[in-house]
Amino acid sequence: MTVSGNLFANEVVQSADDARNSLIGLSPAKHRILKKFSITTAPFRDYVPVLRYAEVILNYAEAAAKMGQLTLALDLLNSVRHRSSAQYVFPNDQVSTSDALVQTILMERRIEFLGEGLRLQDIQRNGLALPSKTGSIGLAPEVPPTAKNYMWPIPSGELTTNKLCVPN
């Protein structure tokens, strides 16, 4: 299973029919920027949601898809998508099998939670490789789930306090 690639090249992110497009803008240098939490007037300057209802619904959809409950999973997925694009219909090949539906849900999570810091949790929860990165300041190779640096180590204080805990 892979859910990687350029999110901004995704047809949903490019679609004028999807209300979430207003959350992505262009800087004066024509770079894409996130406008999702750009409220600058008091008292809402520090507002960032901790848990969103869409996350609960998509978590439920992912679990249902993994359990083979495809109809329930698709209904839940549609309930999130139709808030921003009421007429959208997922292509059959994206929702006809458990694996395809999980892939589609993970892509919807990438779009829905853009800039909210949930991507790493999605990748690690599903045992996917951390994708490689390239850019103007350097590059980082892909990190497979079996690599030692895939997870942060358990803090030494926790290992000292909890004798049942072993280093990872």
Image: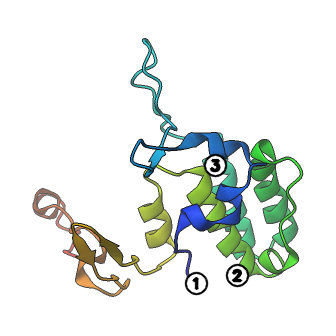
Residue 149, above or below 63: below
| Residue in the foreground of this view, choosing between 101 and 114 | 114
Amino acid under label 2? Asp
Q: Secondary structure at mark 2?
A: helix
Q: How many numbered badges does the structure rendering display?
A: 3
Name the residue beneath numbered marker 1: 1
Disc 3 to disc 2: CB gap under 8 Å: no
Q: In the rendering, which numbered label is found on residue 99? A: 2
- Spatial CA distance of label 1 from label 2 is 8 Å
In the rendered image, the vertical position of residue 89 relative to residue 66, given as above or below: above
| Residue at the front extreme of this rendering | 29
Ranked by sequence position, the earlier of labels 3 and 2 is 3
According to the picture, the residue beneath numbered tag 3 turns out to be 56
Q: Quadrant of residue 2?
A: bottom right
Residue closer to the observer: 69 or 143: 143
Please tell me which of labels 3 and 1 falls first in the chain. 1
Which quadrant holds residue 108?
Answer: bottom right
- Whether tag 1 and tag 2 are in contact, CB under 8 A, the answer is yes
Q: Position of residue 74 (x, y in %)?
A: 82, 63
In the image, taking residue 120 as reference, residue 98 lies left or right, namely right
**Could you tell me which residue is drawn at 73 percent across and 79 percent down?**
100
Residue at 79% across, 48% down: 17
Residue 154 position in % (x across, y down)? 21, 65
At a point 48% along the width and 34% down the height, the residue shown is 37
